[in-house]
Image: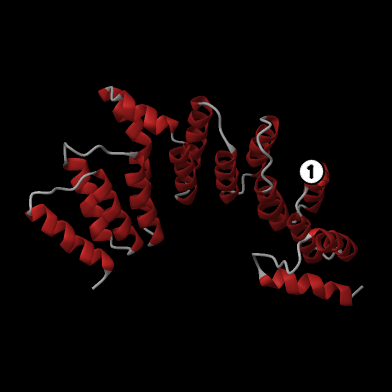
Amino acid sequence: MGNWEKLDILVQETMEKGVFCDNFTFSIRLSAYAAASDLTGIDKIVGRMESDPWVILEWDIYSIASNGYLKVGLVDKALAMTKKLGALGKTLAMTKKMEQIDALIGSTIAFDNLLRLYAETRQKDELDRVWMLYKKKGKIYNKGYMAMISSLLKFDDIDFAEKVFEEWESRSLPYDFRIPNFLIDDAYFRKGLMEKAEGLMNKILAILQFDTWFYLANGCLETNQIPKAVEALKITVVGCPPNWKPSRQQAYFDNLFGIFGRE
């Protein structure tokens, strides 16, 4: 018997004793069904929450359900949940539930999830719309910029991603190297835009992480720019901590250190 089935039995026992589910209990059950890819369970919990007048619907419920559907490739159902998440703020506004409105609008996590979900479900117009709402909400932090840039790159929209990156640079937020790395590794290297990669890396050279040089070296290797690959790898070796290995693509590591044999 799976753990979620044991959870169902426990919930049933408590209900027979007159103790009914609240938001927290529903959320736990929904997360368990999503983790187990139990689509019937997801449908059941969402339906019960939507029909229960004592339950306060919050953004994370639809986010959990959407992730559960995406996990098994049900894009249409995931998109339906994502649209409900996006519409939740409008519903709350119409009913004038101000505390819940503030919680939804004030939750950067909710916006970050919306961006990611619309990217996963290939809804570019909705992605752009939510980004504009996000910007009107107030200050966007590093995670918000990471969510938007990574989402845009799923559509290969490098131009828009570059504009978002420039906006992030202008905000003087704590410098998070993962943000330029999205452009360098996930856009420029993958598209063979080595001049753009080098230009961005030179721009942030004074504070550049050694692993970014590592990915530049691999990009140069894949485009047969061996001398540049060697120079970038030398900088990697000088700057990296003892016993460091890249977290992604072991083939990168093997290929790069093999180039010394060709030089």
Disc 1: which residue: 204
Name the residue at 47% across, 34% down. 130
Image quadrant in which you'd find residue 39: bottom left
Q: Which secondary structure lies at badge 1?
A: loop
The location of residue 124, given as percent across then percent down, is: 50, 42
Residue at 39% across, 53% down? 67
User: Residue 108: x percent and y percent?
Assistant: 48, 36
Where in the figure is residue 260, as x and y percent of width and height? 87, 73
Q: Amino acid at mark 1?
A: Ile
Q: Is residue 199 visible?
A: no
- Extreme residue in the bottom direction: 261
Q: Quadrant of residue 104?
A: top left
Q: Residue at x 60, y 48 (%)?
A: 153
Instruction: Name the spot of residue 111 as percent of width and height, x first.
Output: 46, 38
Left or right of 123 on screen, residue 245: right
Residue 202, compared with residue 104, is above or below; it is below
Q: Quadrant of residue 102?
A: top left
Quarter of the image that includes the C terminus: bottom right
How many circles with numbers are drawn on the protein? 1
Lateral position of residue 29 relative to residue 86, left or right = left
Question: Is the N terminus in the top left, top right, bottom left or bottom right quadrant?
Answer: bottom left
Along the line of sight, which residue is nearer the eye, 170 or 184? 170
Q: Is residue 208 visible?
A: yes
Residue 194 higher or lower than 141, as above or below: below
Residue appearing at x 34%, y 34% in the figure: 87
The colour scheme applied to this rendered structure is secondary structure
Quick one: label 1, few (<14), some, or many (20+) residues within 10 Å?
Answer: few
Q: Is residue 36 left or right of residue 106?
A: left
